[in-house]
Image (spheres, coloured by chain):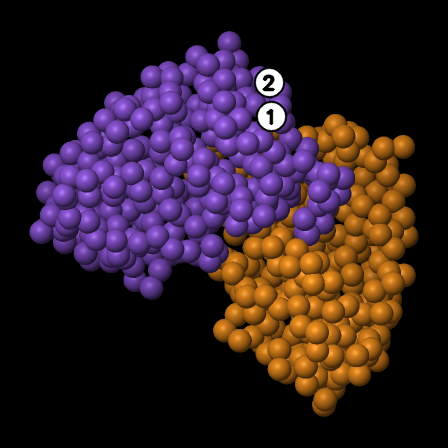
Chain colours: A orange, B purple
Amino acid sequence: MEKIAYVNGAFVTHSEAKVSVFDRGFLFADGIYEVAAVLDGKLIDSASHLARLERSVGEIKLRLPETLERIEAIQKELVARNNLVNGMVYLEVTRGADTGRDFAFPKADVKSTLVMFTSEKDIINAPSAKAGINVITVPDIRWERRDIKSVALLAQVLAKQAAAEAGAGEAWMLEDGKVTEGGSSSAFIVTQDDVIVTRQNGTEILPGCTRKAVVKLAEERQLRIEERAFTVAEALAAKEAFITSASVFVQGVVAVDGKQVGNGKVGPMTDRLREIYVEFAKATAV
Amino acid sequence: MEKIAYVNGAFVTHSEAKVSVFDRGFLFADGIYEVAAVLDGKLIDSASHLARLERSVGEIKLRLPETLERIEAIQKELVARNNLVNGMVYLEVTRGADTGRDFAFPKADVKSTLVMFTSEKDIINAPSAKAGINVITVPDIRWERRDIKSVALLAQVLAKQAAAEAGAGEAWMLEDGKVTEGGSSSAFIVTQDDVIVTRQNGTEILPGCTRKAVVKLAEERQLRIEERAFTVAEALAAKEAFITSASVFVQGVVAVDGKQVGNGKVGPMTDRLREIYVEFAKATAV
């Protein structure tokens, strides 16, 4: 059975799932997206993703075409229609399709576009969760509002393609000698003193939902967290390194630019945080 | 009669002109565009736009799905099918639609998407050509590869929306105290000594096709040109200011941030360069 997507009110097959060439997502990257994980048919950390969606669209004055409640209901229906057990729901909202192409916002009667589709992935049992991944570093050449989860992702595409070509699982982006974040994940290290370090939120990085949950869960367990930028040298001198995202949860990093981190294996703090996160995810799934 | 667009080999009505929601232009802004003017049914400065297209796709390793010759032939056919006399042809090429969403490039068998559509505009007789436009200034928050004409245009959308809200015709973007360029145009001033000043090409700005032609035409006429960055203060102290782009040609700027430039009217050098450009455009149209 072909998979089902949601496009502006209709549930259609993936091959029928289309948008106008005048859609501002296609013409201008004038859109916002979110990716939520699905475990056992339920949405993970949904309130956090919906809150970030609302913030992102607000920052670019894009009107959501549906309420957050309705959006979550559509996500759930899409998961059900696809019999999705484990994977992700992708959601994109754009400033709609006008009759022509003009940079400035269209008139109020142009309705925002809402698209969703699902993909299957066994995040819990992904082989890389045990083995860890290598990361490479690339210059962070993105725009200055990285806190907005926009679909203007060409810099990240190029970063992650460079990683793929190098046989790495992620690219860490560097600015002023510090790691900002990964192409599609937040970056963490664990120092020799067992301090968990991840960059503070700001316009320089996306406020990761999984990052936020992991920081909170660690704090609740009296683990030491420092929110500050770190260098590659600090990562290489660290006990452990890991990334977080909705599609990998907590994922060990065992090498940076070909140099081993810690003992070159996924570390115990990473494993523990992953366990804690999965427990939280399952307990709060909707 | 509804207008006709071109989508991946087919000529279809605008309402039928659609791309997959999996198109990487829609998901990642992983695409390049060009806009060429049309005068009397002919393409303006076409070789220059096609050369820039080839350069842009090369910079992001995107394969054109057709040769440049074939692309120009399709543009011409689209102009003919729409009986377009004066206006523009928009062209977008993206890294195609895969079956799912992955940042890294898709496999070689995913064909790039090619979309074109036209719009009508009497560029020669546009009222703003006589009256000039106001511009506002905004911070340049774009990524670091502005020389690539990608569809990751959200920063420009926000800049040009700010201009529209201020009743201005363009937004000049400022970086380190200097003007980089307009949201969709190149920026020029004419000093009190009749020196035409426009920023030198580099990764900080798009290499404008109309900019390039105007610089060359001015040089051929022994007009003095300096390619260097300028400040807003220099623009306000200048005799004249103007912008260039495929969709306005040469367009006088009579105020910056509400402050008059020169005598507040479109100046003689601007008028002369516009005339020279239009003459060139008509003489070299294909």
Q: Quadrant of the N terminus of chain A?
A: top right
Q: Is residue B273 shown left or right of residue B119? A: left
Instruction: Give the residue at x 49% y 41%.
Output: B54
Q: Seen from this angle, which residue lies furthest top? A: B1
Counting other residues with Cα less than 10 Å from the Cα at mark 2, is it few (<14), some (14-19), or many (20 or more)?
A: some
Place of residue A56 in the rendered image (x, y in percent of width and height, measured from the top left): 58, 52
Q: Quadrant of residue B215?
A: top left
- Residue B12 circle label: 2
Instruction: Give the residue at x 26% y 29%.
Output: B280
- When the figure is inspected, residue B83 is found, relative to residue A239, above or below; the finding is above
Instruction: Give the residue at x 75% y 58%.
Output: A246
Place of residue A203 in the rendered image (x, y in percent of width and height, measured from the top left): 52, 63
Place of residue B237 in the rendered image (x, y in percent of width and height, measured from the top left): 14, 54
Q: Given the image, on which type of amino acid does mark 2 rest?
A: Val
Q: Earlier in the sequence, mark 1 or mark 2?
A: 1
Residue tagged by mark 1? B7
Identify the element where label 1 is drawn: strand
